[in-house]
Image (cartoon, rainbow, N blue to C red):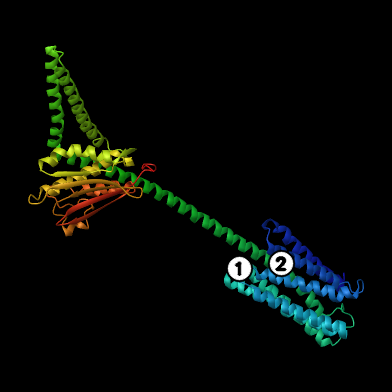
């Protein structure tokens, strides 16, 4: 069976429509603008091929101008779609495409409209597309340099086939010198038609292959990124668990050191505590004997009734004093578990002073107390803050007891400043030696002969765990002043 040129051109149209339509359907799920541009441009070129094969059956205007415009737009659209595979901005290249395409269409239209130069126009047609379709080769070459792939190589061969066969057609028409029949069978016409079949097929397979290769690489990159993200999430979870364990261990260490420090501190106060408890017990004994004496006489005289009231009042005071000592000891010698509650810093100072009073008086130290007139309410662990105050007062007492030649005075004050609570404990000792000032709050650092180096470190840790701070000022003439700053509980201060 022999095929005429027009039928063959129709077959080229079928290839355009089939391949570009197939790609559109195959890649529809990606909803890609690039795919739509490629396929729509290919279909537009297919329509142009139909018009080019129907001269004599359609108006000459449609053959000469509409078909040329459709072919030009279709080729331009496919070039733009291919360029989108390359990274970076392509605005300048796209502008060049527009200028070249517009210039070609203007020259081609002028040859036909003004000069009826169909031979020259056909030479220009094939020469222009031989030049323009070389862009397939250039894009494929750049893609292959970025990432070697079968799709890029197929695009290179498609570009070479397009340009070579169209160039052969242009040379053949140019050498003929005239065209009596545009559809006349000739070797260069056959080369061009066969080249179109091959190049169109290669370019569509190349486009599809490159698209799927890039999609697969993106998919693998996403999967890798997801795997890395999961690994990071697992690592963060593990770090979180490790951090939680470390914090729990730190809290347990603080608790154990707190108990140990309490025990050691109380060991030094045993004699004082015995005195503090013995004093109210003695008062209770004396008042009990007085009650017994008055009641045994069965005398209802006014002076005896007065004696009863005095004895009962003494019993109550002694009982409250003993109860306060026992209660404070029970708080301080609890299990060390952190229990938050609202309490008055002023009352903490009073309770701890009650425990230390005998030890301080034993060293003939005067105590000046200047507490804020209103309750200073703070939310935290009461037992821990009792220990902070105990450590500071005990340190002040020991600092003065070692220097018998100096004025012996301890000053304790509480203040409220800008919704902060300040607790100051000052002594009139000889100050802290310069060589240990920088490490005063470090664990196991002390300048005391029998010191353990726990008290100040533990005090600083407790204060900072409650969002506070502890600082000191010291000099050999004025002694040392420790200042604890704490955030007051909201609503603690009267307006």
Give the answer, above or below, for where 443 lies relative to 117. Answer: above
Which residue carries the number 2 mark? 204
Q: Between 295 and 145, which is closer to the camera in this rendering?
A: 295
Residue drawn 10% across and 43% down? 364
Q: Does residue 99 appear to the left or right of 58 in the view shown? A: left
Where residue 54 sits: x, y (%)? 88, 72
Helix or strand or loop: what does disc 2 sit on? helix
- Which label was assigned to residue 149? 1
Give the answer, above or below, for where 267 lies relative to 63. Answer: above
Where residue 451 sits: x, y (%)? 15, 48
Can you tell which quarter of the image residue 393 is in?
A: top left
Can you tell which quarter of the image residue 336 is in?
A: top left
Residue furthest out toward the front: 302
Residue drawn 76% across and 78% down? 102
Q: Does residue 325 appear to the left or right of 58 in the view shown? A: left
Q: Does residue 23 appear to the left or right of 473 in the view shown? A: right
Q: CA distance from mark 1 to mark 2?
A: 15 Å
Residue drawn 69% across and 68% down? 81
Residue 4 seen by the camera: no
Q: Between 68 and 316, which is closer to the camera in this rendering?
A: 316
Residue density around tag 1, few if under 14, some if 14–19, many if 20 or more, within 10 Å: some
């Amino acid at each position: 069976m022999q095929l005429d040129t027009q039928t063959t051109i129709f077959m080229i149209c079928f290839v355009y429509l089939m391949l570009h339509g197939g790609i559109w359907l195959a890649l529809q799920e990606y909803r890609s603008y690039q795919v739509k541009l490629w396929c729509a441009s290919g279909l537009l070129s297919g329509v142009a091929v139909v018009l080019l094969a129907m001269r004599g059956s359609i108006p000459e205007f449609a053959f000469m101008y509409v078909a040329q415009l459709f072919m030009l737009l279709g080729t331009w659209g496919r070039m733009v779609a291919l360029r989108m595979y390359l990274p970076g901005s392509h605005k300048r290249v796209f502008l060049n495409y527009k200028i070249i395409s517009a210039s070609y269409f203007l020259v081609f239209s002028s040859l036909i409209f003004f000069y009826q130069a169909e031979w020259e126009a056909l030479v220009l047609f094939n020469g222009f597309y031989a030049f323009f379709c070389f862009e397939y080769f250039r894009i494929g070459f750049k893609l292959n340099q970025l990432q070697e792939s079968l799709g890029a190589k197929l695009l290179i061969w498609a570009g070479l086939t397009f340009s070579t066969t169209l160039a052969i057609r242009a040379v053949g028409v140019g050498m003929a010198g005239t065209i009596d029949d545009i559809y006349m069978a000739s070797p260069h016409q056959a080369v061009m038609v066969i080249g179109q079949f091959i190049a169109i097929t290669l370019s569509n397979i190349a486009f599809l292959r490159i698209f799927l290769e890039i999609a697969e690489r993106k998919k693998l990159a996403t999967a890798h990124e997801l795997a890395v993200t999961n690994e990071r999430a697992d690592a963060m979870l593990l770090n979180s668990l490790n951090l939680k364990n470390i914090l729990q261990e730190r809290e347990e260490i603080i608790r154990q050191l707190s108990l140990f420090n309490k025990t050691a501190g109380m060991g030094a106060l045993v004699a004082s505590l015995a005195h503090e408890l013995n004093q109210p017990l003695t008062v209770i004994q004396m008042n009990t004997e007085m009650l017994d004496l008055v009641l045994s006489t069965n005398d209802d005289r006014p002076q005896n009734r007065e004696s009863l009231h005095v004895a009962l009042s003494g019993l109550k005071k002694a009982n409250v004093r003993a109860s306060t000592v026992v209660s404070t000891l029970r708080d301080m010698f609890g299990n060390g578990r952190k229990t938050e509650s609202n309490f008055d810093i002023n009352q903490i100072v009073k309770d701890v002073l009650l425990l230390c009073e005998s030890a301080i008086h034993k060293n003939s130290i005067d105590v000046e107390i200047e507490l804020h007139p209103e309750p200073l309410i703070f939310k935290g662990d009461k037992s821990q803050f009792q220990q902070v105050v105990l450590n500071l007062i005990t340190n002040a007492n020991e600092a003065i007891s070692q220097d018998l030649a100096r004025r012996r005075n301890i000053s304790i004050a509480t203040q409220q400043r800008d919704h902060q609570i300040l607790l100051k404990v000052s002594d009139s000792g000889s100050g802290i030696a310069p060589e240990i000032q920088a490490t005063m709050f470090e664990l196991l650092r002390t300048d005391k002969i029998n010191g353990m180096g726990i008290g100040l470190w533990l005090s600083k840790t407790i204060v900072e765990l409650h969002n506070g701070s502890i600082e000191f000022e010291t000099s050999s003439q004025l002694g040392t002043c420790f200042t604890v700053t704490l955030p007051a509980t909201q609503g603690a201060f009267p307006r």
